């Protein structure tokens, strides 16, 4: 997981601190609605390692109320009334009681304030990643991110860390809604050689947010919050749900939100010389993402361009790519040919939806 790109530091290490036994959803005080005592606040800065209930803080960490102003900028909080802001080299930490050998995904919401090159470190010893926040995908300034890990210990530390060095320590990122979810990596079957082809297994989706969850770029298969899939691109892809978006099949899908810089891939075992069919759905998420879209599908060296005219109100079409395997391992990949912006919000990236990906071998070949 070296060099995985992601903004937020989640560090998991052995510890003897009290541990919270996890279940899917927010970690303890994960939305920061339980705040410090008045005596533990100096303006917005929290004073003392344990000022923030259920968390341990280090460095310049602020407790931010929704609607608070910083100069001419209004600070927005995505869930509830409070969030935290991490100054230079600041972090928040919580101990979690997990099951050794299990896979988990962390979801959190983050927003830039005044710094433009913000990133957050996320690490689970001995693995780590960096989430870049240069690209904001939602116009309200907040995006939700996910990152996954395999628990190497039963008790781990979740650390969110800002590595930035700004002249103004109050220019750090805002953090809110920290959640965790156990992942159960699916396996290929005789009905589908793809793993998690319908994207039903994925990170925790925050119920009070309507913008999906970003799967960060350069995420490898075994540490992907989207089990079975890799994000092989410079930009993130978006994990969306049927509660807030139009989804072609089932309850979950992927939106390719950054053109050719937003790609998902999976390597599948194939038999050289055998013929396969790759079928999938292409549509729009009913999020005012309008216009001519093209999804490019790849199966090894074979490609298929699938045009889709979106009215931004939902809908999808199906496509099939037939190919003969040239290798014992075939890379299946999807990306969007074009960049697209929402018609009702010209600062929010969007794109075509991909779902229901199936790979089958043709009998008699």
Image (spheres, grey):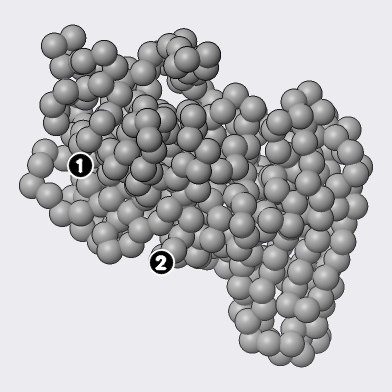
Judge whether residue 308 can be spotted in this image.
yes
Quarter of the image with the C terminus is bottom right
Tell me the residue that label 1 is attached to.
Answer: 95
Label 2's element? loop
Q: Position of residue 91 (x, y in %)?
A: 27, 39
Q: Position of residue 283 (x, y in %)?
A: 80, 44
**Residue 298 x, y percent position in the rendering:** 76, 69
Name the quarter where the N terminus is drawn.
bottom left
Give the residue at the far left of this rendering.
16
What residue would you read off at disc 2? Answer: 2
> 152 and 51: which one is in front?
51
- Spatial CA distance of label 2 from label 1 is 23 Å
Of the image marks 2 and 1, the number of the one nearer the N terminus: 2
Neighbours of disc 1 within 10 Å: few (<14), some (14-19), many (20+): many
Which residue sits at x=60%, y=50%?
236
Q: Residue at x 53, y 51 (%)?
A: 216
Residue sitting at x 48%, y 28%: 113
């Amino acid at each position: 997981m070296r060099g995985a790109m992601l903004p937020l530091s989640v560090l998991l290490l052995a510890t003897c601190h009290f541990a919270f036994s996890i279940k899917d959803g927010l970690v303890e005080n994960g939305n920061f609605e339980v705040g410090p005592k008045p005596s533990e606040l100096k303006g917005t800065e929290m004073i003392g390692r344990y000022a923030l209930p259920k968390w341990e803080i280090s460095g310049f960490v602020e407790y931010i109320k929704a609607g608070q102003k910083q100069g001419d900028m209004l600070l927005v909080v995505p869930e509830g009334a409070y969030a935290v802001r991490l100054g230079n080299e600041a972090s928040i930490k919580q101990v979690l009681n997990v099951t050794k050998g299990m896979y988990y995904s962390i979801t959190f919401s983050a927003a830039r304030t005044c710094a433009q090159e913000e990133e957050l470190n996320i690490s689970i010893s001995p693995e780590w990643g960096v989430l870049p926040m240069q690209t904001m995908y939602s116009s309200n300034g907040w995006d939700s991110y996910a990152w996954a890990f395999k628990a190497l210990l039963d008790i781990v530390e979740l650390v969110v860390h800002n590595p930035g060095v700004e002249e103004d320590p109050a220019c750090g990122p805002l953090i809110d809604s920290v959640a965790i979810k156990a992942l159960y990596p699916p396996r290929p079957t005789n009905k589908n050689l793809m793993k998690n082809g319908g994207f039903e297994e994925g990170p925790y989706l925050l119920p009070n947010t309507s913008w999906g969850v970003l799967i960060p770029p350069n995420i490898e298969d075994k540490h992907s919050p989207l089990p079975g899939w890799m994000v092989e691109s410079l930009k993130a892809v978006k994990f969306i749900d049927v509660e807030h978006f139009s989804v072609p099949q089932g309850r979950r899908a992927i939106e390719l939100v950054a053109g050719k810089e937003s790609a998902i891939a999976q390597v599948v075992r194939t038999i050289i010389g055998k013929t396969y069919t790759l079928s999938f759905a292409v549509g729009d998420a009913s999020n005012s993402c309008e216009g001519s879209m093209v999804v490019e599908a790849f199966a090894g060296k074979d490609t298929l361009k699938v045009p889709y005219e979106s009215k931004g109100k939902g809908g999808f079409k199906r496509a099939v790519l037939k190919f003969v395997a040239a290798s014992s391992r075939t890379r299946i990949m999807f990306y969007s040919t074009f960049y697209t912006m929402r018609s009702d919000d010209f600062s929010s990236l969007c794109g075509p939806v991909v779902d229901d990906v199936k790979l089958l071998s043709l009998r008699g070949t």
